[in-house]
């Protein structure tokens, strides 16, 4: 039995860092790799086949790194291809979905904010159908993930009024894209609503998977560092899928403490 679980967390860009944060807090003994496909973000307006191909590339990197489990920290990729990825890779793959169950527990109306792909997906429709007591208004936001990506990576200004409709008949909003978590407080303020996100739910599921495969999760924290990789890197690098070692790395601590989690 290995004593240090190793986990790969993937998103189209910076959004999955919200899930990474919850996972590192829930499994402090694990070693995490984070892969952000920033070069090709956003995914939300892309066709299913393309999203599946990009996701498979990321998971192949994790496979090469010998991970024990992977997290698709992207609602869009989960909606597009999680079953395909589970069938294809030999490790458990945990996905993220809009946490409509959390809203349905307390509210009879809720907005669900998602990328265009997730918003029209059969997976989201099936999920919502499980909670007939709550009326969900699904709002597709074609450019918000990209705007968050730009704001967090380059400091570009982000005006929510340009992306969100002026509010509606809902007391809460379900975040159906991990990028939105990074501006969750701003969204809550903009509409004066409560927001729900799925990051902790994913971390809990990951913990169950790790326990299931029998790796200790109560050992002392590993001595190695978590590593983050981005595909948005050296322009001369042709191979954007495997870039370990010869590309710029996102510094996780910089992102987590200074950018993503405090600014909004
Ligand atoms: N963060 C992603 C999600 O949860 C993807 C956003 C995008 O790339 O469009 O859906």
Image (cartoon, rainbow, N blue to C red):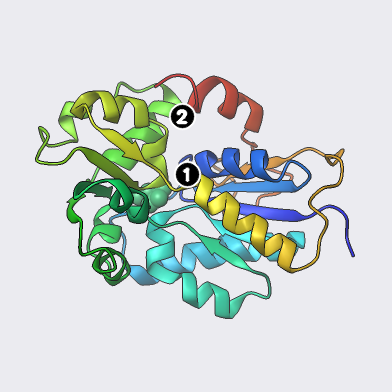
Q: Which residue is mark 2?
A: 153
Split into 4 quadrants, where in the image is the C terminus? top left
Using residue 224 as the reference point, say whether residue 118 is left or right of it. left
Residue beneath the point at 48% across and 75% down: 83
N-term mark: 2 or 1: 1
Residue 17 x/y as whole percent = 54, 40
Residue 228 x/y as whole percent = 65, 41
Residue beneath the point at 35% across and 23% down: 156
Residue 122 x/y as whole percent = 27, 71
- The residue at the far bottom in this view is 87
Q: Which residue is mark 1?
A: 13
* Dot 1 alpha-carbon crowd within 10 angstroms: few under 14, some 14 to 19, many 20 or more: many
The numbered disc on residue 138 is none
* Res 91 quadrant in image: bottom right
Using residue 179 as the reference point, say whether residue 165 is left or right of it. left
- Judge by depth and name the residue closer to the eye, 46 or 260: 260
* Dot 2 alpha-carbon crowd within 10 angstroms: few under 14, some 14 to 19, many 20 or more: some
Residue beneath the point at 46% across and 29% down: 153
Residue 3 x/y as whole percent = 88, 55
Number of numbered discs on residues: 2
Numbered disc 2: secondary structure: helix
Instruction: Determine whether the beta carbon of the residue marked 1 sits less than 8 angstroms from the nearest atom of ligand 1.
Output: yes
**CB of mark 2 within 8 Å of CB of mark 1?**
yes
Instruction: Determine whether the beta carbon of the residue marked 2 sits less than 8 angstroms from the nearest atom of ligand 1.
Output: no
Q: Is residue 146 visible?
A: no
Residue beneath the point at 27% across and 67% down: 121
Cα distance, mark 2 to mark 1?
Answer: 10 Å
């Amino acid at each position: 039995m290995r004593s240090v679980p190793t986990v790969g967390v993937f998103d189209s860009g910076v959004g999955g860092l919200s899930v990474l944060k919850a996972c590192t807090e829930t499994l402090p003994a694990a070693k995490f790799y984070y892969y952000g496909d920033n070069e090709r973000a956003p995914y939300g307006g892309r066709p299913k086949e393309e999203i599946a191909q990009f996701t498979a590339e990321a998971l192949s990197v994790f496979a090469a790194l010998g991970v024990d489990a992977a997290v698709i920290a992207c609602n869009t990729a989960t909606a597009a291809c999680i079953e395909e990825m589970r069938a294809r890779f030999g490790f458990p793959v945990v996905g993220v979905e809009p946490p409509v169950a959390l809203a349905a527990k307390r509210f009879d109306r809720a907005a669900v904010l998602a990328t265009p792909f997730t918003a029209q997906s059969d997976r989201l429709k099936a999920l919502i159908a499980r909670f007939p007591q709550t009326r969900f208004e699904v709002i597709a936001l074609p450019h918000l993930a990209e705007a968050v990506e730009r704001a967090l990576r380059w400091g570009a200004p982000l005006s929510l009024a340009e992306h969100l409709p002026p509010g509606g008949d809902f007391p809460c909003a379900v975040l159906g894209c991990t990028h939105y978590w990074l501006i969750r407080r701003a969204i809550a303020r903009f509409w004066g609503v409560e927001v729900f996100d799925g990051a902790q739910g994913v971390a809990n599921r990951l913990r169950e998977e790790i326990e299931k495969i029998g790796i200790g999760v109560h050992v002392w924290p590993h001595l190695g560092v978590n590593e983050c990789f981005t595909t948005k890197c050296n322009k001369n690098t042709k191979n954007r899928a495997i870039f370990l070692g010869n590309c710029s790395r996102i510094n996780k601590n910089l992102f987590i403490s200074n950018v993503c989690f405090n600014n909004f």
